[in-house]
Image (cartoon, rainbow, N blue to C red):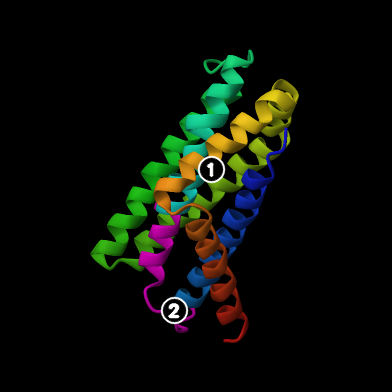
Amino acid sequence: MNLERLDQEHRLIERFLQLLKAWEERHYRKLPLPDGWMSHAVDFIKLFTDGIHHAKEEHVLFPFMENHGIPREGGPIGVMLAEHGDARTLATAMESAWKAGDPAAFFLAGKKYGQLLTQHIFKEDHILYPMAKGAIFDDGAVAVEEAFLQVEKPLGGDQARNQWFNWIDLEERQLKNQ
């Protein structure tokens, strides 16, 4: 089974987490930050990480894995779902800090979010996705990939997904040039 789309998204989320660290450093060194950086970060987390990536896992990949004998309760799927919930809680804290204009609270929650997602992605890359690839054979792979596209469609499909990749590219270039 090819999970290339999910792998690409993991790499993008990791790049975003590096941006968060760089923005935090710039904030505490009293260096300028991009306009709207907090709102864009919250949008990325809510619309891309949770809205696109986690939605594909929760609504497509995990159920498909369960149907192929990998248990939710007491197994890696249950752990991943719990961590998605923890990530949503931290994202809500970041959004509240943004709305309150409190960068320190934003970065505190953001640091916890980054630590959680870094460990979460490692587990998915090295445990869950290999299990999925072993459980879902070629006949199911096409159905999973088509279902992934259906999850993305209401959020703008490839166009929206590509916009997030382009946004990260732009933010990284801007940081490099400052």
Q: Amino acid at mark 2?
A: Pro
88 or 130: nearer the viewer: 130
Q: Kindly state the secondary structure of the residue where label 2 is placed.
A: loop
149 or 28: nearer the viewer: 149
Q: Look at the image and give the residue range highlighted in magenta.
A: 29-46
Mark 1 or 2: the one toward you: 1
Q: Amino acid at mark 1?
A: Leu
Which quarter of the picture shows residue 173?
bottom right
Please report the residue visible at 56 percent of the width from the left and 59 percent of the height from the top: 17
- Looking at the rendered image, the quarter that the C terminus falls into is bottom right
Q: Kindly state the secondary structure of the residue where label 1 is placed.
A: helix
Q: Residues within 10 Å of mark 2 (few under 14, many from 20)?
A: few
Outermost residue on the bottom side: it is 178
Say whether residue 43 is left or right of residue 134.
left
- Looking at the rendered image, the quarter that the N terminus falls into is top right
Which quarter of the picture shows residue 88?
top left
- Circle 1 is placed at which residue position? 149
